[in-house]
Image (cartoon, grey):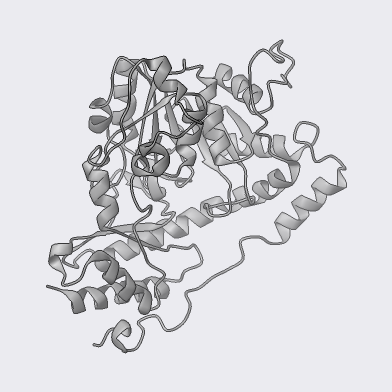
């Protein structure tokens, strides 16, 4: 069968199914917020209602709303009160938002390698990076696939290290019966336009630690001490508040979350079953005791099994009508110019001065992560896809793989 890239018919001639993310319930919530004539989060009802509902959904005692997922992580990090110049271990395969808060707090990101099948940090890779300067671990549950949190938490507790979970890509991901975000000191979520649920932007932090909760509340709101606990203006803090309008939409979106992630989990699992036997391709590894909510689908290619490289393989998939892309990010975060040049602040990186030593971000720091990104192919998954859509995606993958088999 001739590939579409060579003039043949497309495997996916029609667009994959789509749907509306927002509807009448979001409009009703927004109208209620506007009719209240108070869109400030502390005086209105929507943000407080959303926080109560989000905490309940994730089996947490407390929830603090923030202006973004990046703000949620920065708030969580700042809440720990880690001294500048300290080290924080995290993943090299993530969004910059995981790292911005560390850098603003003048902490030093230490990148641990990932597992080649799950693309996540492991207890073993984290242990290899722990030093006397380590003060925290930030795990990233990538693309809906949860980290092995039982093992990571045992390691963290043994070393007395708090854990922050970056759950921006992994709403309702399940590890051993518990949702991602419920294991560490704090779990951080994003509500931007690309996540499982969205309020356009926004984020939140969940925790079972009362002290951490009050500190996140203060830090996200200029240390204005809305709870009147005597902490007003006692620390430097930014303005990371979420509006009543965002919270109104988030309330409605949260109601849809279980259905969204159930559909994505089912469709992602189906896709794996349809391509698992294709030689030279490796679907994402989901451990038997875990469940992925598939923010996207990331598989790997063994270039030695095909007559073309990864990029040409992706081009062929796109020609078949599948919106595939080469990898998730183009390179590990530590190889981005801002890290290679350590240009976080003009002229000098205060964290290095405080630490009294230099840190280098270079090729080879996390070899498995580098290999994952060089050999991965990103595919879309949507709750609106039909089973037929997934079978068409699998058909396109199998067609290209067959044509290019070495």
The front one of 139 and 60 is: 139
Task: Left or right? Give the position of 168 relative to 148.
Answer: right
Q: Quadrant of the C terminus?
A: bottom left
Residue 190 visible, this angle: yes
Res. 398 image quadrant: bottom left
Is residue 380 depicted above or below 115 in this figure? below
Query: Where in the figure is residue 254, as x and y percent of width and height?
Result: 60, 48
Is residue 226 depicted above or below 114 in this figure? above
Q: Quadrant of the N terminus?
A: bottom left
Query: Where in the figure is residue 262, as x and y percent of width and height?
Result: 46, 55
Query: Where in the figure is residue 400, as x and y percent of width and height?
Result: 25, 76
Please report the residue visible at 32 percent of the width from the left and 84 percent of the height from the top.
4
Q: Residue furthest front?
A: 347
Task: Left or right? Give the position of 193 relative to 222.
Answer: left
Task: Left or right? Give the position of 105 relative to 24.
Answer: left
Residue 59 visible, this angle: no
How many badges with numbers are in the image? 0
The front one of 77 and 337 is: 337
The front one of 205 and 290 is: 205
Query: Where in the figure is residue 204, as x and y percent of width and height?
Result: 58, 36
Please report the residue visible at 62 percent of the width from the left and 31 percent of the height from the top.
64
Q: Residue furthest top?
A: 230
Please report the residue visible at 34 percent of the width from the left and 33 percent of the height from the top.
149
């Amino acid at each position: 069968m001739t590939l579409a890239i060579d003039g043949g018919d497309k495997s996916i001639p029609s667009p994959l199914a789509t749907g509306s993310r927002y509807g009448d319930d979001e409009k009703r919530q927004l109208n209620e917020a506007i009719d209240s004539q108070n869109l400030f989060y502390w005086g209105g009802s929507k943000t407080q209602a959303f926080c109560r509902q989000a905490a309940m959904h994730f089996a947490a005692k407390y929830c603090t709303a923030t202006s973004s997922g990046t703000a949620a992580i920065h708030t969580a990090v700042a809440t720990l009160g880690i001294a500048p110049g300290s080290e924080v271990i995290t993943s090299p395969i993530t969004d910059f938002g995981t790292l911005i808060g560390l850098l603003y707090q003048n902490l030093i990101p230490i990148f641990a390698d990932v597992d080649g099948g799950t693309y996540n940090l492991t207890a073993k890779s984290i242990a290899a990076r722990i030093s006397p300067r380590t003060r925290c671990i930030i795990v990233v549950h990538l693309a809906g696939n949860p980290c092995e949190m039982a093992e990571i938490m045992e390691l963290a507790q043994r070393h007395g290290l708090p854990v922050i979970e970056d759950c921006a890509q992994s709403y309702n991901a399940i590890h051993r019966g518990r949702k991602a975000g419920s294991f560490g000191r704090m779990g951080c979520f994003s509500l931007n336009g690309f996540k499982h649920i969205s309020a356009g932007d926004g984020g939140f932090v969940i925790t079972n630690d009362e002290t951490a909760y009050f500190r996140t509340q203060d830090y996200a709101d200029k240390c204005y001490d809305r709870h009147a606990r005597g902490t007003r203006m006692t620390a430097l803090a930014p303005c990371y508040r979420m509006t009543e309008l965002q919270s109104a939409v988030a309330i409605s979106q949260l109601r849809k979350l279980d259905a969204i992630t159930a559909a994505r989990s089912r469709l992602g699992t189906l896709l794996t079953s349809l391509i698992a036997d294709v030689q030279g391709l490796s679907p994402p590894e989901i451990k038997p005791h875990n469940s992925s909510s598939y923010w996207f689908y990331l598989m790997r290619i063994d270039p030695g099994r095909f007559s073309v490289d990864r990029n040409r393989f992706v081009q062929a998939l796109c020609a078949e009508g599948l919106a595939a892309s080469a990898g998730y990010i183009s390179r590990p975060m530590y190889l981005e110019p801002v890290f290679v040049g350590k240009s976080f602040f003009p002229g000098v990186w205060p964290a290095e001065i405080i630490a009294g030593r230099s840190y280098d971000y270079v090729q080879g720091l996390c070899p498995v992560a580098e290999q994952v990104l060089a050999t991965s192919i990103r595919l879309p998954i949507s709750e609106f896809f039909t089973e037929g859509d997934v079978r068409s995606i699998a058909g396109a993958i199998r067609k290209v793989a067959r044509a290019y088999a070495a």
